[in-house]
Each structure stands twice: as C-alpha cells, then as structure tokens.
Image (cartoon, rainbow, N blue to C red):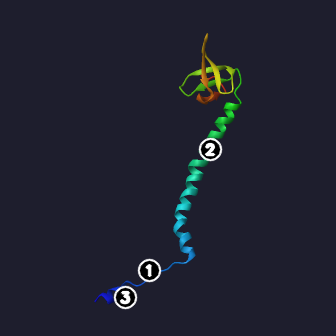
Amino acid sequence: MFTELAYAMGPAPQGGQGSGLMSFLPLILIFVIFYFLLIRPQQKKAKEHKNMLDNLKKGDKVILSGGEYGVIEEVRPNTVSVKISENVKVKYGKAYIAVVRQTEED
C-alpha cells in the first residue's frame, strides 16, 4: 500500500536554466517600470532643485516652502537672507526655497 503511494508521487519535475530566468522576469519588469515612473523623475526633479539653489543671487524673487513670498538680500553657502516686508529680513536654509519666481505674481 505505501509503495504504490511512493511511486505515485515520483520525482519533482526539473526545469532548465531558462525557467529560473523566467521566474524572475516579472520582478525585473516591475523594477524597470518603477525606475522609469518613480525613481528617475524624482532624481531629475532633485537635480533641477539643486541647480536652482546653486544659481541663487541677490534680488531673486522667491517663494519659500512655507508659502512666504520674498526677495533674496544675501546668499551664503547654506543660508539666504530673505526680505519678506519693509525692514523685515529673515534667514532661511537654502533647502527651504521652493521656487524662484520669474514674473511678478502678487
């Protein structure tokens, strides 16, 4: 009785080397899709933001990440002084500058 059961199970089917690659193909495809839809655009946007921060100069009109509008008064390696009103200057880290305005948007 037990011998018949053992014969019925038999050895597991052996796949070739191609079947190993085919089993990972969906994972590879998902990674490629994530790279082109998520990772690459995020890296591109970060590179553009860093380039914008490196090119800041006195007199640029900016919008800060908190929503404040201002004009850059002084640029230092890691900080900027922003004039947000008459006789009101505030020092911010460069990373908090969201956008350099091209036109007057008040």
Comes first in the chain, label 3 or label 1: 3
Label 1 element class: loop
Query: What amino acid is at disc 3?
Result: Tyr
Disc 3: which residue: 7
Eyeballing the image, is 35 above or below 60? below
Query: What amino acid is at disc 1?
Result: Ala
Q: Give left or right: position of 80 versus 14.
A: right
Eyeballing the image, is 84 above or below 14? above
Comes first in the chain, label 1 or label 2: 1
The label on residue 12 is 1
**Residue 55, position as x, y percentages in the image:** 71, 30
Eyeballing the image, is 44 above or below 80? below
Label 2 element class: helix
Count of numbered marks: 3
Find the distance from the CA under tag 3 to the CA under tag 2: 58 Å
Q: Residue at x 51, y 78 (%)?
A: 15
Query: What amino acid is at disc 2?
Result: Gln
**Residue 100, position as x, y percentages in the image:** 65, 28
Image-quadrant location for residue 8: bottom left
Q: Residue at x 55, y 57 (%)?
A: 31
Q: From the viewer's side, name the closer residue of 19 and 10.
A: 10
**Which quadrant does the C terminus fall into?**
top right
Find the distance from the CA under tag 1 to the CA under tag 2: 46 Å
Q: Nearer the viewer, mark 1 or mark 2?
A: 1
User: Label 3 neighbourhood size at 10 Å, few (<14), some (14-19), many (20+)?
Assistant: few
The label on residue 43 is 2
